[in-house]
Image (cartoon, rainbow, N blue to C red):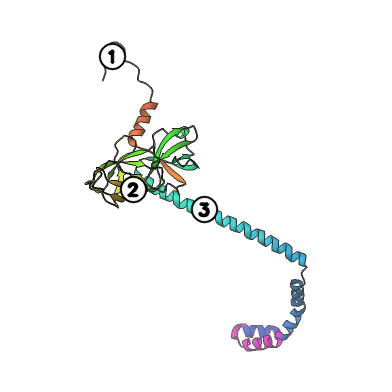
């Protein structure tokens, strides 16, 4: 009865809070004494662990740390690849033509050739002469097509020539490969040609391979020798030819129409008496 009365009194009036606090202070040493055996057992188990157990745990943690580092490296590579793919997709939207993303699978190690192999071939609709770009500018063109791979000749190859024009004034010329990954030459421009370092070169559309308006290179140096009829002009490709891991294979409107016409069945010849529309 006393206990019930105290509970009701405490529940309604809250006058026993001070008493409860005083009792908690008085009983705290007893609680500490009761927990001494348990805390002592934990301390002994932590400090008297066998050396072999510690070595095993250390080795397991080292393996786990190594695996986590490997995963972190993969995540960094995936993040970089994701950024490259985003750049490629952004450039494909800017291009406005039909595009296909391909991955570089091999690089020609011949120092006199600048060509790579991509993992798309005739089964994906790739055709010889198809323009290839990266996220920045023109990379090259397809020269050989296999069912599942294709060879791309880079614009810096000594055998490659690309009709370009100066974006500032429309001056037309040809960008010739030099065999060096970062240098193009612009031959046969007279000394009085309106071109200077920093000018952006874009594809002119002449030649029928590359559509007009794709960035190609930036002029790096213009040397005018009065004793020579032509200026010595060099340019640096805008595309990252030595760093690219993915490439854009581009179908222009003309090439798509050409492919459609090539795949359409032949129209039967009109019989006698038929009137051609």
Q: Secondary structure at mark 3?
A: helix
| Residue 243 is inside the magenta segment | no
Lower sequence index among marks 2 and 1: 2
- Residue 235: mark in rendering: 2
Residue 80 in the image, given as x and y percentages of width and height:
48, 53
- Residue 77: mark in rendering: 3
Residue 234 in the image, given as x and y percentages of width and height:
33, 47
Q: Which residues are magenta?
A: 11-28
The residue that mark 1 highlights is 274
The residue that appears at 71% across and 63% down in the rendered structure is 57
111 horizontally vs 237: left or right: right
56 horizontally vs 153: left or right: right
Lower sequence index among marks 3 and 1: 3
Choose mark 2 or mark 1, whichever is in front: 2
- Would you say the residues marked 2 and 1 are in contact, meaning their CB atoms lie under 8 Å apart? no
The residue that appears at 66% across and 86% down in the rendered structure is 20
Q: Nearer the viewer, residue 259 or 190?
A: 190
> Magenta part mainly helix, strand or loop?
helix
Q: CA distance from mark 3 to mark 1?
A: 65 Å
């Amino acid at each position: 009865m006393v206990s019930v009365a105290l509970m009701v009194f405490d529940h309604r009036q809250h006058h026993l809070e001070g008493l409860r606090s005083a009792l908690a202070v008085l009983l705290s040493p007893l609680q500490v004494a009761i927990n001494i055996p348990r805390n002592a057992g934990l301390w002994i188990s932590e400090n008297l662990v066998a050396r072999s157990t510690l070595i095993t745990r250390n080795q397991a943690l080292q393996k786990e740390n190594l695996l986590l580092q490997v995963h972190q490296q993969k995540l960094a590579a995936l993040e970089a690849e994701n950024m490259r793919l985003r750049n490629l997709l952004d450039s494909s939207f800017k291009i406005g033509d039909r595009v296909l993303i391909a991955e570089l699978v091999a690089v020609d190690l011949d120092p006199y050739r600048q060509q790579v192999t991509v993992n798309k071939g005739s089964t994906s609709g790739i055709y010889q002469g198809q323009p290839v770009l990266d996220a920045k500018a023109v990379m090259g063109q397809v020269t050989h097509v296999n069912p599942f791979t294709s060879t791309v000749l880079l614009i810096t190859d000594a055998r490659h020539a690309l009709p370009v024009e100066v974006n500032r004034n429309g001056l037309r010329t040809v960008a010739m490969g030099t065999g060096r990954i970062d240098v193009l030459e612009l031959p046969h421009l007279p000394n009085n040609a309106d071109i200077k370092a920093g000018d952006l070169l874009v594809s002119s559309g002449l030649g029928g391979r590359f559509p007009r308006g794709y960035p190609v290179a930036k002029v790096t140096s213009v040397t005018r020798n009065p004793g020579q009829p032509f200026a010595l002009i060099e340019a640096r490709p805008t595309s990252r030819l030595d760093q690219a891991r993915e490439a854009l294979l581009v179908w222009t409107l003309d090439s798509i129409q050409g492919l459609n016409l090539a795949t359409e069945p032949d129209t039967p010849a009109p019989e006698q008496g038929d009137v051609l529309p």
